[in-house]
Amino acid sequence: MRLENASFSYGDKVILDGFSLSLPDEGVTALSGPSGCGKTTLLRLLAGLLTPESGSVDAPGLARTAILFQEDRLLPAFSAAAQLKAVLPRGAEVVDYLDAVGLASEADSPVEALSGGMKRRVALARALAYAGDKSLLLLDEPFTGVDAGNARRIMARLRALDIPVLLSAHDAESLSLADRVIHLSGPPLSANSDNIG
Amino acid sequence: MKPSTGRPTDKGKNIALKLLAPAVFWLGLWQLAAMAVGQSLLLPSPLEVGARLWALLGTGLFWLSALATLFRIVAGTVIGVAAGAALAVLTHVSRAADALLSPAVRVLRAAPVVSFIVLIILWAGSDTVPVIICAMIVAPVVWENLRTGLASPSPELLEMAAAYRMGALRRARYIYLPAALPYLRSGVLSSIGLAWKSGVAAEVLCTPKRALGSQIYWSKLYLEIPSLFAWTAVVAALSLAVESLVRRALEKGGGGK
């Protein structure tokens, strides 16, 4: 996965200015940096939700990109299982993914009945399920509201996947769980030279 | 300490008070006004109207008129809801359809209903005019409500659907339908009263053989004012009953997913 000389701005505010970054094709990579430095914009560019004004995003060999947004973005009034069924092929099994985030017993619970941390885990399960085994998995602050035990459990599951995972995080706990960390600053975004591929 | 056993009775009393007190107040006020006017031709008393209503209940004409009007209004409302819903979906998904149809629907909504009644009497039979008028009144109300509902899903949720490549059917089922249903319910409920008002007004003007509106017209023509009040009370009672039934049905149908 490679971002080559990418530029992007919101109006007059330049977020990326000829920024390049290449990511390893396996393992969990964490993006760290202060709020507003451009982590979310970077993830959205990699997900194809934003188009760079110049430069390119290249993801050879990956069928698709799965993204966990900074907000849960769950379907109101539907059950936890329905959140996954809504994005998976008809008949796909969802309990395994809910089990991976410790919520198999809440499969039929409406999301409104779940706590903030549980909702986050449902959103994580949805991203995991959608990612399958041929995706780049992008997670924007995945462990917000998730307790340390569940965060470790989910991270173990992420590591077991044979796909590249890129997550943004603020807290030391989340960063310590990643295989490698890229330190970002900005805007305009710049990365620690040691970590740029 | 003795356990309280008065709750159900208190609840019953409260309901009786809530329902009866306003009825007694308004009927009393009506009676006083009728006594003050002193002329049944101008304002009959509630007792006179009640007696006339009781007499009408025993006639075949009453039941045939009530059933015929009920059928026309329900048919017009169903057609109006279907047309309004179809228009809302069409104007939501197609900009061209929105540009073409939305101004026309707004004009339809703003124009005086009596103009349409007079015009449609020229084109359709007297039994059909109230159905068409009901549909014309209901469709814009449902269209407006449903259109707002279809536009209500947040951009974030729609972006999620795009990111997860949800198809049109899944977006409809998981995003648009749950968002639009409360608006559709509200549109249907608020259009029922309008349907009755406009449908009966159409009946008054085109006088079908069997119709509550026709009976109102004949009562006015022959200065049978207690009958006019009685027929009007029947229209109001049927309108409220239908609205209450539909409300219950919609509340029942809006269960879990």
Image (cartoon, coloured by chain):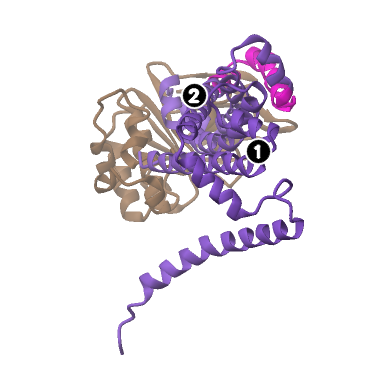
Q: Residue B202: where, in percent of width, then height?
A: 64, 25
Residue at 45% x, 50% y is: A144
On screen, residue B192 above or below A6: below
- Quadrant of the rendered structure where residue B45 is? bottom right
Tell me if B21 is positioned left or right of B108 in this view.
left
- Which chain is tinted purple? B
Depth check, front residue: A25 or B210:
B210
- Residue B120: image tag: none
Q: Magenta span: helix, strand or loop, mainly?
A: helix
> Is residue B125 magenta-colored?
no
Q: Nearer the viewer, residue A81 or B140?
A: B140
The one of B165 and A46 positioned closer to us in this rendering: B165
Find residue B236 and report its horizontal and vertical position in percent: 57, 42
Q: Residues within 10 Å of mark 1 (few under 14, many from 20)?
A: some
Report the residue marked by disc 1.
A187
Query: To which residue does mark 2 refer?
Result: B75
Asked whether the residues under marks 1 and 2 belong to the same chain, the reply is no
Categorize mark 2 by other alpha carbons within 10 Å: few (<14), some (14-19), many (20+).
some
Q: Does residue A149 lie above or below B199 as drawn?
A: below
Q: Secondary structure at mark 1?
A: loop
Magenta residues?
B86-114
Given the image, what chain letter belongs to the residue carrying mark 1? A
Q: Is residue B87 magenta?
A: yes
Against A95, residue A50 (above or below) is: above
Residue B199 percent across, percent down from the top left: 60, 28
Marks 1 and 2 sit apart, C-alpha to C-alpha, by 62 Å
Q: Residue at x 26, y 27 (%)?
A: A92
Q: Secondary structure at mark 2?
A: helix
- Can you tell which quarter of the image residue B2 is in? bottom left
Which of the pair B121/A119 is nearer the observer?
Answer: B121
- Residue B257, position as x, y percentages in the image: 35, 38
Of the residues shown, which amino acid type is indicated by label 2?
Answer: Ala
